[in-house]
Image (spheres, rainbow, N blue to C red):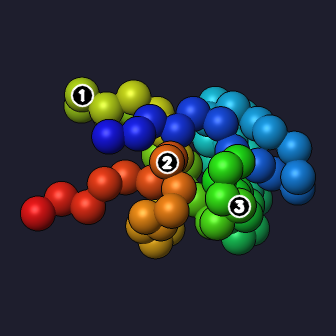
Amino acid sequence: MAKMTTCLFHGKSISIDDALSRRDDARERGLSAPHFECDECEKPVRAHKSGGNAQAHFEHLERNGNCSQSHVARV
């Protein structure tokens, strides 16, 4: 399973830590979540904080079989 730790934000690559900080800041201010994109396919992604056994990472909003950073569908 791919673990994406960078994304695009306004055309610039940012880390998962930066994205989580921006997301949390927007929530605190009552603003909508920032728009993050995959740095490979430029499709929308969501930032996930670490928890359990998972490290902080990005996931595509919709699986993209043409992108190496997209999670493989589980059967």
First in sequence: mark 3 or mark 2?
3
Residue extending farthest to the front is 66
Inter-mark Cα distance, 3 to 1: 27 Å
Dot in front, 3 or 1: 3
Give the number of marks: 3
Mark carried by residue 63: none
Q: Amino acid at mark 1?
A: Asn
Work out whether residue 27 can be spotted: no
Q: Which residue is mark 1?
A: 53
Pinpoint residue 59: horizontal percent, then vertical percent: 47, 53
Q: Are marks 3 and 1 in contact (CB under 8 Å)?
A: no
Q: Amino acid at mark 2?
A: Ser
Residue extending farthest to the left is 75
Q: Which residue is mark 3?
A: 42
Please state if 50 lies on the left or on the right of 43 as rendered: left
Q: Which residue is mark 2?
A: 68
Q: Amino acid at mark 3?
A: Glu
Pinpoint residue 21: horizontal percent, then vertical percent: 68, 38
Residue occupying image coordinates x 58% and y 59%: 45
In this orientation, which residue lies closer to the viewer: 40 or 51?
Answer: 40
Q: Mark 2, residues whose alpha carbon is within 10 Å: few (<14), some, or many (≥20)?
A: few
The quadrant where residue 18 appears: top right
Pinpoint residue 24: horizontal percent, then vertical percent: 64, 48
Pinpoint residue 16: horizontal percent, then vertical percent: 62, 35
Secondary structure beneath label 3: loop
In the picture shown, does residue 42 fall above or below 58?
Answer: below
Secondary structure beneath label 1: loop
Residue occupying image coordinates x 39% and y 28%: 55
First in sequence: mark 3 or mark 1?
3
In this orientation, which residue lies closer to the viewer: 8 or 51?
Answer: 8
